[in-house]
Amino acid sequence: MNSLFEYTDTLRAPYEAFLFDASKETFPVRAHWHYFVEVLYVLQGNVEVTCDSESFVVGPDEVFICPPSSVHAIYAASYGALRYYVLKFDLNQLESSVHSSESGNIRFTSCFPTSMPRTEEFLKLSLRSQELENERNKVRDIFERCIKELNGREFGYLSITRSYICELLIQYMRRRRAMGLKINEITESKESNSINTITEYIDEHLSEELRVEDLAKRCNMSYSYFAKCFSELYGQSCKHYISFLRLCKAENMLLFTDYDLTYISQETGFCDCSHLIHAFKEKNKVTPHQYRKIHAGEGAKEF
């Protein structure tokens, strides 16, 4: 059974860009996470993006940013055609060798950290209004140029794609600041990389018993310090995060397989079906059976 983690090759392919057409691809997009930032720009239709424990509806000419390491999935939020641009990139590849507020350089890893708030004001940006037509066209053009460069792979394509992504993020930040929302630079602790690694371990061992004390030891931290760092980075306790990933994996299995609840509860690390049903209903307000029935036909029956 596939994990939620989606491998991304930060060295050979630090950037990805493509046009997603739901009529030609497997849809909905199952819950997954990766170390890249993922930016969506909707062209046609409305999508529902779940980002960790929150849900957002994104429509035409709206931008949505999925922070690194966030668990996200994409569903249809309207009938009819559905098309959107996707841009994925490693923030570390964007960093300038010089960082100075006087020179105007930006440390993107600090402005778009893993701990970025999961709120609409930070993640979603609308460019629908007529007065934003020039800005809207500029953003669309950036996505199209990124797709062209990454498909063409001509001399210097990675460097020019990097410049386009930097331009997009700066445009996003300028629009936010114009709206009165200041994006402060957030310095994450040096333990962030270690905890990011442990989340891969958690993902791979969801069917097993996972004790926070043992995870702390794997990071060479005390229980209390690990719990504090994890909570600061992910905005929730490690125990809650484990339960959240298990429920996300259960949702994927309900949508994309025909497995029964007994098997799903075993694969996702729940004690039994009753425990799974109770936790699932608490998160989704419906039972697993109702969830599968509601979304019948949306998922491809292969995983």
Image: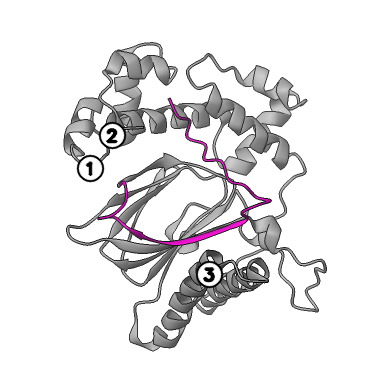
Badge 2 marks a residue whose secondary structure is helix
Residues 64 and 90: in front is 90
Q: Where residue 232 sits in the image (x, y, percent)?
A: 63, 42
- Could you tell which of marks 1 and 3 lies nearer the N-terminus? 3
Badge 1 marks a residue whose secondary structure is loop
Within 10 Å of the Cα at label 1, are there few (<14), some (14-19), or many (20+) other Cα atoms? some
Task: Give how far apart the Cα atoms at labels 3 and 2 are.
Answer: 32 Å
Residue topped by disc 2: 255
Question: Label 1 is placed on what type of residue?
Answer: Glu
- Could you tell which of marks 2 and 1 lies nearer the N-terminus? 2
Q: Is residue 200 visible?
A: yes
**Which quadrant of the rendered structure holds the N terminus?**
top left
Mark number, residue 146 = 3
Q: Is residue 185 visible?
A: no
Q: Are marks 3 and 2 in contact (CB under 8 Å)?
A: no
Residues 2 and 216: in front is 2
Given this view, does label 3 or label 2 mark the residue nearer the observer?
Answer: 3
Within 10 Å of the Cα at label 2, are there few (<14), some (14-19), or many (20+) other Cα atoms? many
Check if residue 62 falls in the magenta segment: no
Task: Give how far apart the Cα atoms at labels 1 and 3 are.
Answer: 30 Å
**Count of numbered circles on the image:** 3
Q: Are marks 2 and 1 in contact (CB under 8 Å)?
A: yes
Badge 3 marks a residue whose secondary structure is helix
**Which quadrant of the rendered structure holds the C terminus?**
top left
Task: Give the answer, above or below, for where 235 lies relative to 152.
Answer: above
Check if residue 10 falls in the magenta segment: yes
Residue topped by disc 1: 298
- Residue bounds of the magenta highlight: 1-26
Q: Where residue 144 sits in the image (x, y, percent)?
A: 46, 73
Task: Give the answer, above or below, for where 94 lies relative to 136.
Answer: above
Q: Quadrant of residue 252 in the image?
A: top left
Image side of residue 211 versus residue 284, left or right = right
